[in-house]
Image: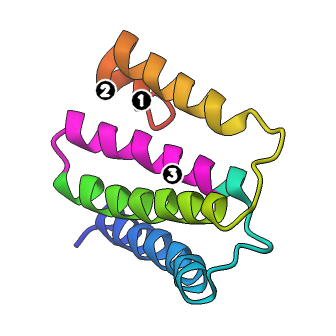
């Protein structure tokens, strides 16, 4: 295993582990006090971008890892909104989704991967 594989695996584990406690808390307590909807939505969108990048570059591990955390963050966002937390006035999640969509539609995999090049 080379250093890139080790770092990728570590990043995957950290990404999944950091999302699960919030989801468990939301499911158990059915209360969303202290949950940042903007952060959860932004994390979901970032994960969606990486999932699309993994699909475009034929990297199933990236797709699985980022897709899983994206789904968890999307569920957290939905539950937080359902249990009464209002989204802030932040436009960051909407901007992030628009930016990822524009990058994919205009430049494909190089558009999403330009940060990593």
Q: Please give left or right for residue 51 compared with residue 15 in the image.
A: left
Q: Provide the residue designation for mark 1.
A: 112
On the image, the x and y values in percent for residue 92 come to: 71, 36
* Percent x, y of residue 94: 63, 31
Residues in magenta, as a range: 40-59
Which comes before the other along the chain, label 3 or label 2?
3
- Judged by depth in the image, the label closer to the viewer, 3 or 2, is 3
Q: CA distance from mark 3 to mark 2?
A: 19 Å
Mark 1 element type: helix
Q: Residue furthest top?
A: 106
Q: Residue at x 78, y 74 (%)?
A: 33
Q: Residue at x 53, y 77 (%)?
A: 23
Q: Which residue is mark 3?
A: 44
Crowd around label 3: few <14 · some 14–19 · many ≥20 (10 Å): many
**Dots 2, 1 in contact, CB < 8 A:** yes
Q: Residue furthest right?
A: 89
Which residue is rendered at x = 41% and y = 76% of the image? Answer: 13
Tell me the quadrant of the picture where the N terminus can be found: bottom left
Q: What residue is disc 2 on?
A: 109
Q: Is residue 57 left or right of residue 106?
A: left
CA separation in Å, label 2 and label 1: 5 Å
**Residue 52 belongs to magenta span:** yes
Helix, strand or loop: magenta stretch: helix
Element under label 2? helix
Q: Position of residue 62 (x, y in %)?
A: 29, 55
Residue at 53% x, 82% y: name it.
27
Question: Could you tell whether 95 is left or right of 52 in the image?
Answer: right
- Tell me the distance, in whole angstroms, between the alpha carbons under discs 3 and 1: 15 Å
In the rendered image, which quarter contains the C terminus? top left
């Amino acid at each position: 295993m080379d250093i890139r594989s080790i770092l990728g695996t570590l990043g995957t584990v950290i990404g999944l582990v950091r999302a699960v406690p919030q989801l468990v808390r939301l499911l158990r307590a059915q209360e969303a006090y202290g949950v940042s909807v903007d952060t959860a939505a932004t994390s979901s969108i970032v994960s969606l971008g990486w999932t699309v990048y993994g699909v475009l570059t034929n990297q199933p591990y990236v797709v699985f890892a980022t897709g899983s955390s994206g789904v968890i963050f999307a569920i957290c966002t939905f539950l937080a909104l359902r249990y009464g937390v209002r989204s802030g006035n932040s436009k960051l999640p909407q901007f992030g989704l628009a930016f990822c969509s524009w990058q994919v539609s205009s430049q494909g995999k190089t558009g999403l991967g330009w940060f990593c090049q």
